[in-house]
Amino acid sequence: MATDRMDRKEFLSLLGLGAAALTCSYFLAGCSPNSSNLITAPPTNVDFTLDLTDPANSALKNNGGYLYKNGVIVARTAAGSYVAVSMTCTHAGGTVYYDTNGNEFHCPVHGSNFATNGSVINGPAASPLMKYNTSLSGTSLRVYS
Ligand code: FES
C-alpha cells in the first residue's frame, strides 16, 4: 500500500539530488564569460618535437593544417610557417582552431579571434593565448616555451 510518508532513504536521496543541483547551478554561474577560475591554465615548460613524416602529424604537411598536442595547438599558417599557441580560449575555456581564411585562431564558443602570435583580435576574450616557439629542422618541428 502506498503511503505519503517519505522514508529516511528517500529523503536522503532527494537531499542528495538537491545538493547536486545546487552545486551544478553554482558552477554554471561560475562559467560566465570572463570568469577565469575554471579555465585551464596554459601549459608551461612546453618542449616537444613533432616528426612531420609521422602520419599522426600529417595535418601539418599542408598550409592551413593544425593539430593539438599537450594543450597546444600547432598550425601551419596559410603562408606556410609554423605557429603554436595554447589551445584553450582565455575567455571561458573553449578550444580554438586555426582559421586559414583569416589567418587567425578562432574560438567557436563565443567568437573570439586571436592573431597567430596569440594576441586578441576581437573578444569577448580579453587576454591573449600563450605563444610558444617553433623551430623546424629537416622534418622535425620542435615546439617549446
Ligand atoms: S570561450 Fe568564449 S570566446 Fe572562447
Image: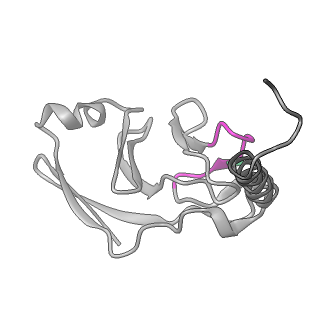
Left or right: where does residue 104 sit relative to residue 133?
right
Image quadrant assignment for residue 12: bottom right
Left or right: where does residue 35 sit relative to residue 49?
right
Task: Please check the rendered image and state whether residue 108 is part of the magenta-colored stretch, yes or no.
Answer: yes
Residue 40 lies, in percent from the top left, at 54, 63
Q: Nearer the viewer, residue 50 or 109?
A: 109
Q: Main secondary structure of the magenta part?
A: loop
Residue found farthest to the right: 4
Residue found farthest to the top: 1
Residue found farthest to the bottom: 45
Q: How many marks?
A: 0
Residue displayed at 76% across by 47% down: 7
Residue 51 lies, in percent from the top left, at 13, 46
> Which residues are drawn in magenta?
107-116
Residue displayed at 78% across by 23% down: 1
Q: Answer yes or no: is residue 34 visible.
A: yes
Q: Nearer the viewer, residue 123 or 134?
A: 123
Residue displayed at 65% across by 36% down: 108
Please, is residue 26 above or below residue 59 in the view? Answer: below
Q: Which quadrant, please, contains the C terminus?
A: bottom left
Left or right: where does residue 13 sit relative to residue 133?
right
Q: Nearer the viewer, residue 61 or 130?
A: 130
Q: Nearer the viewer, residue 132 or 6?
A: 6
Residue 126 lies, in percent from the top left, at 75, 63
Residue 95 lies, in percent from the top left, at 55, 45
Residue displayed at 42% across by 32% down: 64
Q: Answer yes or no: is residue 123 visible.
A: no
Image quadrant assignment for residue 99: top right
